[in-house]
Image (cartoon, rainbow, N blue to C red):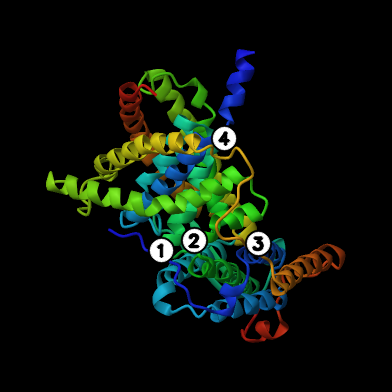
């Protein structure tokens, strides 16, 4: 029974989730837009996007739906502000990057315990692999790329950049959030 | 720092269409385009895409950044996928073909042989790829510049998205100016403490860590205010009844015409592709004639 209730609340999308999905998307959009100047040395057209931690963290803190909307809509907003147009398969990939860490949202206790951080990091990594994999492989269908090129030119640079940003910043942001939760008592 | 909203009213025929009809049109067109590798069909979509682009009366200044991104992306795809690597998605292009350039070399000391062969088919495939990608990207590039952000909520709700989800989309656009201002204030405060974001110095890890003093205060502030917003919305009985929107969207005859046209194009595409087995990779004979000494 307890398990059923916990499963139900994981996919809940109430008022709180509506607000945090919107805040997460707006934050991701603003951060991604603002850090477009940070380019990876020797890599073409791939920027360091520390903002990727936002969908991962919002997923972990508020559940998979919030994580997905944060990634999907945040990437869409960032592309629109940068004038890049609309790339639905990359938006979907970013959404998945937020959805997967959200699958362990119910298992978070203090957000600073080693178990919480490790679980979040593992799921963030799974999210990056699946999300960037889906986006990169979609290029085979849309752009006519072959599998090897999609992996080499799209997946690997995006995976490395997002994994470094996510794995470094996610624990920092989780510990900061634990202080907020403790202080506010929410 | 100001986040530039890309929309500015141009009062063009494109902006008169209902946003829902335009989203449906764009998605159906994109779905149809990806079925084709035959340039004769793709040129039809290319023409439609660029007609939309020119009817939107967008200036070069507005779209320059987008075009630069698109051109770099397409050039890389064509260069890596078609010109440099010998493999491709379509079997007909990769197997056999007419060589137009062959280069053989041996790596000194190790003795490895390098063979590079470029075929006419791959060159034409690259050209087709450019037309196809330009048709897709220009179709969507127009959207952010010609759609009023105030209409996003009612647009997505009108397209069948649950009201809560549509409201979330709407709210995100409304939070942008506030969060951009918070970001600006935080960056100024950190700069006053000696923080230098623009200085790209040090390795990858130190660059990433350097962003934490900026991301964390803005995010935590946003979460704290989010709790208050959620409470305020609950107190006002958010989503207890059927939601209405301030600006009501109404389909007009030309919106129906656009959606029917898009639907017909997609159905025709399915018939052409699956029923008639047309639309696969095609290369004109005259293209082969351009190259002398073809093997």
Front disc: 4 or 3: 4
Q: Is residue A115 above or below residue B133?
A: above
Residue density around tag 4, few if under 14, some if 14–19, many if 20 or more, within 10 Å: some
Which residue is label 2 attached to?
A: B149
Asked if residue A22 can be seen in this view, the reply is yes
Q: Quadrant of the N terminus of chain B?
A: bottom left
Q: Tell me which residue sits at (47%, 73%) in the image.
A: B9
Question: Residue A22 or B190: which is nearer the viewer?
Answer: A22
Q: Which chain is mark 3 on? A: B
Q: Are marks 2 and 1 on the same chain?
A: yes
Per the model, the C-alpha gap separating discs 3 and 2 is 19 Å
| In contact (CB < 8 Å): disc 4 and disc 3 | no
Which residue is label 4 attached to?
A: A13
Per the model, the C-alpha gap separating discs 2 and 4 is 23 Å
Residue density around tag 2, few if under 14, some if 14–19, many if 20 or more, within 10 Å: some
Asked if residue A42 can be seen in this view, the reply is no
Residue B44 x, y percent position in the rendering? 69, 78
Assign a secondary structure to mark 1: loop
Q: Which chain is mark 2 on? A: B
Per the model, the C-alpha gap separating discs 4 and 3 is 27 Å
Q: Are marks 3 and 1 on the same chain?
A: yes
Front disc: 2 or 1: 2
Question: Residue B273 or B21: which is nearer the viewer?
Answer: B21
| In contact (CB < 8 Å): disc 2 and disc 1 | yes
Which residue is label 3 attached to?
A: B27
Which residue is label 1 attached to?
A: B5
Residue B95 x, y percent position in the rendering? 69, 63
The answer to which quarter of the image holds residue B50 is bottom right
């Amino acid at each position: 029974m307890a398990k059923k209730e916990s499963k139900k609340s994981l996919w809940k999308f109430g008022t709180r989730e509506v607000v945090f999905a919107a805040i997460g998307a707006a934050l991701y959009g603003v951060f991604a837009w603002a850090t477009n100047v940070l380019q990876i040395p020797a890599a073409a057209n791939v920027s360091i996007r520390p903002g990727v931690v936002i969908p991962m963290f919002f997923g972990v803190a508020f559940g998979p739906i919030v994580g997905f909307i944060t990634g999907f809509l945040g990437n869409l907003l960032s592309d629109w502000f940068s004038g890049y147009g609309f790339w639905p398969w990359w938006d979907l990939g970013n959404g998945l990057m937020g959805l997967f860490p959200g699958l362990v949202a119910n298992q978070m206790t203090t957000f600073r315990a080693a178990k919480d951080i490790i679980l979040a990091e593992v799921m963030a990594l799974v999210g990056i692999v699946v999300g960037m994999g889906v986006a990169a492989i979609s290029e085979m269908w849309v752009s006519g790329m072959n599998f090897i090129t999609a992996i080499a030119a799209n997946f690997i640079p995006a995976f490395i950049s997002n994994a470094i940003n996510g794995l470094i910043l996610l624990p920092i942001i989780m510990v900061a959030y634990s202080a907020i939760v403790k202080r506010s008592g929410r | 720092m100001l986040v530039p909203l890309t929309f500015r009213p141009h009062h063009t025929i494109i902006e008169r269409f209902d946003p829902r009809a335009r989203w449906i049109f764009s998605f159906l067109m994109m779905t149809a385009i990806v079925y084709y590798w035959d340039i004769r069909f793709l040129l039809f979509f290319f023409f439609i895409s660029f007609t939309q682009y020119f009817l939107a009366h967008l200036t070069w200044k507005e779209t320059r950044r987008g075009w630069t991104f698109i051109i770099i992306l397409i050039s890389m795809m064509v260069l890596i996928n078609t010109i440099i690597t010998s493999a491709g998605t379509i079997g007909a292009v990769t197997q056999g073909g007419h060589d137009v350039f062959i280069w053989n070399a041996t790596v000194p000391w190790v003795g490895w042989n390098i063979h590079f062969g470029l075929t006419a088919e791959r060159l034409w495939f690259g050209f087709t790829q450019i037309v196809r990608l330009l048709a897709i990207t220009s179709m969507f590039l127009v959207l952010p510049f010609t759609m009023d952000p105030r209409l996003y909520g009612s647009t997505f709700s009108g397209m069948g998205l649950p009201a809560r989800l549509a409201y979330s989309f709407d709210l995100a656009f409304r939070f942008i100016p506030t969060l951009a201002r918070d970001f600006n204030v935080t960056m100024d405060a950190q700069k006053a403490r000696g923080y230098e974001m623009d200085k790209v110095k040090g390795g990858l890890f130190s660059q990433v860590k350097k962003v934490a003093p900026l991301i964390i205060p803005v995010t935590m502030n946003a979460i704290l205010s989010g709790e208050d917003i959620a409470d305020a919305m609950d107190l006002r009985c958010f989503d207890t009844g059927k939601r209405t929107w301030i600006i009501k969207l109404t389909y007009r005859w030309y919106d129906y015409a656009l959606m029917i046209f898009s639907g017909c194009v997609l159905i025709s595409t399915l018939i052409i592709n699956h029923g008639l087995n047309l639309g696969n990779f095609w290369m004109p004979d005259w293209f082969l004639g351009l190259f002398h000494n073809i093997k």
